Amino acid sequence: MMPMREHSPESSRQDTCRGYTLTMAKKQRENISPDLIDRLLDDWRHERPDLDASAMSVVGRILHLGRLLETAANECLRGTSISYTDLDVLATLRRSGAPYQLTPTALRKSVLLTSGAMTACLNRLERRDLISRNAVHGDRRSLAAALTTKGLKLIDKVIAIRFEQARQVVEILSGSERTELARLLRKLRLSLPS
């Protein structure tokens, strides 16, 4: 991979970077350095110039950010005694409102877990007395999960930690940048199958 040429901040010349154009002055003003995805795209432009890998500048970053953000979320939860998956289920029950109870089917619609993973998570949370399982309308075949008092106290404490960690992640962006990024990500998400 060739190193990028350096330009002075006042330069209006553009660096073609083997296929895409960036105004170096603007790039330096915004303090944006090439990242892993830029390097991967550069490699592909060099090795397979016949392919258009430009969509990976978005998709690759979304995938990479997803991994980094999930790792950071798990790290911030380390001292709370619950995993990110546990948090997701407890938070879903909490935001459902009193009596903080949902069927496994309703839970699965709000979290990204398979049926088997959901069952394992619910069993783990029940063993820790963070949820209880109750028959829905007397039907023992359908057990709803409900937050216990202990589960409610824990999720109220932990969700504040999680939201603060998320705030710190995006604080590099201005309010208008966050709004625009959220709008674009929503547009992309809604274009894909559920």
Image (cartoon, rainbow, N blue to C red):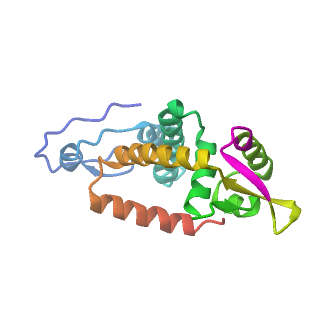
* Residue 76 shown in magenta: no
* Residue 133 shown in magenta: yes
**Which residue appears farthest toward the front when viewing the image?**
149
Residue sitting at x 49%, y 42%: 69
**Which residue appears farthest toward the left when viewing the image?**
10
Residue nearer the viewer, 173 or 139: 139
State whether residue 126 is above or below residue 94.
above
Residue nearer the viewer, 70 or 37: 70
Q: Is residue 24 left or right of residue 44?
A: left
Q: Is residue 111 left or right of residue 180?
A: right
- In which quadrant of the rendered image does the N terminus lie? top left
Residue sitting at x 24%, y 46%: 27
State whether residue 174 is above or below residue 81.
below
- The span picked out in magenta is 125-134
Residue nearer the viewer, 87 or 1: 87
Q: Kindly tell me whether residue 22 is visible in this rendering.
A: yes
How many discs mark residues in the rendered view? 0
Q: Whole-percent x and y of residue 160?
A: 43, 47
Residue sitting at x 30%, y 38%: 33
Residue sitting at x 46%, y 45%: 162
Q: Whole-percent x and y of residue 107?
A: 69, 59
Q: Whole-percent x and y of residue 148?
A: 65, 50
- In which quadrant of the rendered image does the C terminus lie? bottom right
